[in-house]
Image (tube, rainbow, N blue to C red):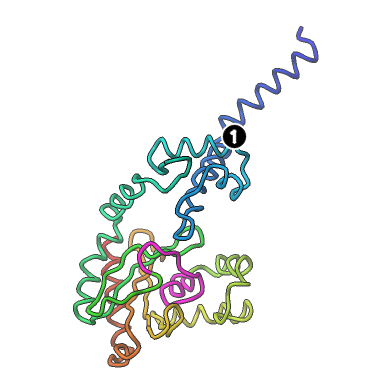
Amino acid sequence: MAGPLALQRRRAARSVAATRLNPDHVMSSLTKMLSILDVFSSSATSMTAEEIAEHMGFSRTTCYRYVKELASVGLLVGSNGRYTLGPRIIHLDYNMRQSDPTLNAAKPVIQHLVQVTGGDALVSTLFDEQIINVMHESGAENLQLGFGRGRIMPLFVGASSKVIVAAMSRARLKRLHERHNAELGEFATDWTAFWRHCQQIVESGYWISRGELDAGFVGIAAPIRTASSGEINSSLSLVFRAEHFALFDEQVLGKLLIDATARIGAAT
């Protein structure tokens, strides 16, 4: 019969094995490793492993291991002890643009919209309580937008974000409000006002923002409802200089957008 010490060792071994095999544990480690990619930005284009460890709160040993793994698959590139984002990201971006059903369906639609209206067109998508611009088609004026393709949008600022957020269920909006109420700004002063504002956006079918993201520009957006799931995770926007937008009938432009998003959604 095994003694108490042997039994303790067996239990410890089983515990370690279970932890290693636990998908939640593996995913947690993977999430932490991939979160290193978010450290890099236009103001922090390269970092040492030590700087990354300090920024992320990782031990140096753990950070060195994560950085080595990311570099081995091309997500990071090291040179003279500093790391930058790697070429694998560009390859993944290309594959996404070729395979994403929403982007494939949107491309001819927004090209037509740009030709007809002269404005810039954007497709924005929700992920992990963030909204990012994933497609940008420049119009006749080739506007220099502060939030072009690849940029994370504010959740509650701008028509592109608002039409996506407003389409969420009441329960999801409640959770979003609780976690991000400090970011609401002029969107709403409290939960009741927030909910009513979202309902107003949904009932309208489209929304207009004036100078919220870029001074002197007006954006108009409508949500894209995916036919296969019935969900709304993306939006289509047109952006104009204010004087250009003033030439349009807002309701006609809104209907044009709603029809366009219906065509995109039907193909996804």
Q: Decide: is 24 above or below 250.
A: above
First to last magenta residue range = 148-167
- Badge 1 marks a residue whose secondary structure is helix
Res. 231 visible in picture = no
Camera-nearest residue between 88 and 205: 88
Q: Residue furthest right?
A: 4
Q: Quadrant of the C terminus?
A: bottom left
At 61% from the left and 25% from the top, the residue drawn is 17
Give the vertical position of 9 relative to 84 (above or below).
above
Q: Amino acid at mark 1?
A: Thr
Farthest residue to the top: give it.
1
Occupied quadrant, residue 186: bottom right
Q: Residue at x 59, y 34 (%)?
A: 61
Q: Which residue is identified by label 1?
A: 61
| Residue at image coords 20%, 67% | 108
Q: Classify 10 Å Cα crowding around label 1: few (below 14), some (14-19), many (20 and above).
A: few
- Establish if 63 lies above or below 218: above
In the picture, measured across the screen, residue 78 lies left or right of residue 98, that is: right
Q: Position of residue 50 (x, y in %)?
A: 57, 43
Q: Position of residue 127 (x, y in %)?
A: 46, 59
Identify the image quadrant of the N terminus: top right
